[in-house]
Image: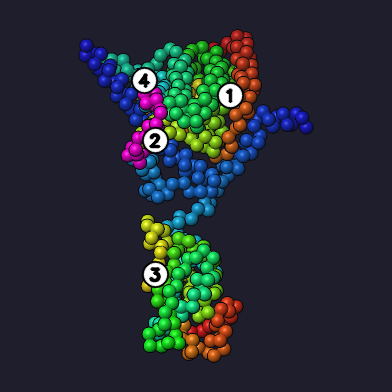
Amino acid sequence: MVEVGVKIVLSLTQIAVVMGVVLLTVMFLTLAERKVLGWMQDRMGPMEVGPYGILQPVADGLKLFFKEDIVPAGANKFLFSMAPLLALVPALIGFAVIPFGPDLTVEVFGVQFKPFVISDINVGILYILAFTSIGAYGIILGGWASNSKYSLLGGLRSAAQVISYELNVGLAIVGVLLLAGSLSLVKITEAQTGWFWNWFIFAPPFPQIFAFVVYFISAVAETNRLPFDLPEAESELVAGFFTEYSGMRFAFFFLAEYANMILVSCIAAALFLGGWNAPAPFLQFHGSLAHLLWLSATIWFAVKVYFFLFLFFWLRATLPRLRYDQLMRFGWKVMLPIALGNILITAIAAYLFPRG
Amino acid sequence: MKLKDWIKTIIFYEILVGMNATLRHLLHYKPITLQYPHEKRSLPDSYRGMLSLLRYDDGTEKCVGCDLCEAACPSRVIKVISAEVPGEPTKRYAKEYYMDMTRCLFCGLCVQACPVDALGMTREYEWAVYDKRHLYLNKEQLLAIGDRAFPVREKRLELQHPNVAFFNVAFTHLPPKDN
């Protein structure tokens, strides 16, 4: 009985810490995005709130918290309130299987406890794919329940786009799964230990560089970021599926978008760039400092994730939005064949030259 | 050539060029933003800002109530109610003078039309107000703007050089008068 209690307390603390870190990262990202975009466009970004505008996320959060919560006339009230939660919860729940650090096991009050992964389930990556697909429901229902043309068009676009690009994400990952021989993100990360050429993006027998490119482009499309932000294209659809949302409900959609960005960055880092592994073994704490391995490992993981997040901003500053038919053609006629060809070649290579 | 184009397509050559451009701007960060309320840009010499009524150096109003500014104004900003100067039947002055600055387009035609240089354009532009009615200015307000914007005043016409006094009537290309 005590054991169960300790387990529950440990899990809840772990979940609280991970959620806290994710939400803090989201807060930081909203500022970082505006700053980076500004710097790339010879502007300054927010400068008024606090020194160099660093308190801007706090001001934005307070503003959203105190804003009037409007439900448009003729909207489906139940679905209108449910949609933001349906978007936010799947985005946050995916972090449960991400390994943020080495696969250590600590014993606390006689309970085995893994501090750097909330739950190491053996179908981790499938679990994430399943839940991010549910996130699309939040967007579609939010668009439909708003009783507004712009929202509905945004929701419909999102439905088509997310379905097309989910497929590519799934197929791009298959190559990695073939090489790693596991669906658990912990095992996949462990299969990439050692030097950087063991990372699946460079790994023999067949480097997953094409899969990586397909995965990243599809991930940008799946999170509705530029240049694939057709569901919320502000120059065509006002704000797309969240046109009618305000206050905290809008904040939930906003959080969901950024949490999704962090999630796909974490997956990309874990699957293709070796997760918490350093490019070279001597760049981790080792030898007499081996008990501090977790520190350097989490730092390496954060560096990789932040690289991807910066790439999101960078793409946004550079590229204009795709046209809708271009988006569909690119997804089905270019990305899908590349992903399928990659699976075929990886399968043959993995059969002929099995990894030690 | 075909192979070269094909290679450029598969390595996203155009996108990489664009991303290089944005990264260059990030690394050589030179913002062109002016943090407006904290720093202000310098105005050109011929800036046409808020309108004002002027006085001579002895404190009397320049305006003779001739209504030419009202006639010149293309958007009917100005309303002059003219009257005789008490005790001096040959002289007139503006008993009341109103400007509806919500309609003004700062063309400067009233300043050019004035025969006695009684109107001046200041370099003020921060005239945002919460109530539109605060932009309906009367004579006292316009004179106050003139007082704070033009601290150096002209002598009365009859005390100026006779030629200048004659040509002072609506000729803008004259050399500046020394007071």
Name the one closer to the observer, A236 or B96. Answer: B96
- Residue that mark 2 sits on: A246
Instruction: Residue lying at the far left in this picture: please name it.
Output: A2
Q: Which residue is mark 3?
A: B138
Based on the picture, tell me whether residue A177 belongs to the magenta stretch: no
Mark 4 secondary-structure assignment: loop
Q: Secondary structure at mark 3?
A: loop
Three-letter residue code for mark 2: Ser
Residues flagged by tags 3 and 1 on a common chain: no
The residue wearing badge 4 is: A118
Percent x, y of residue A355: 56, 13
Give the residue at mark 1: A214
Asked if residue A223 is positioned above or below residue B169 in the image, the reply reads above
Residue type, label 4: Ile
**Residue A78 magenta:** yes
Task: Report the Cα–Cα distance between label 4 and label 3.
Answer: 73 Å
Of badges 3 and 2, nearer the viewer stands: 3
A61 or A314, nearer to the observer: A61
Chain to which the residue tagged by mark 3 belongs: B
State whether residue A1 is above or below residue A17: above
Name the residue at 43% across, 40% down: A31
* Circle 4 crowding by C-alpha within 10 Å: few under 14, some 14–19, many from 20: many
Residue contact between numbered discs 4 and 2, judged by CB atoms under 8 Å: no
Chain at numbered mark 1:
A
Disc number placed over residue A159 in the picture, else none: none
Q: CA distance from mark 1 to mark 4?
A: 28 Å
Identify which amino acid the numbered label 3 is placed on: Asn
Mark 4 in CB contact with mark 3 (< 8 angstroms): no
| Magenta stretch, residue numbers | A63-80
First-in-chain label (1 vs 4): 4
Look at the image and tell me in which quarter the N terminus of chain B lies: top right
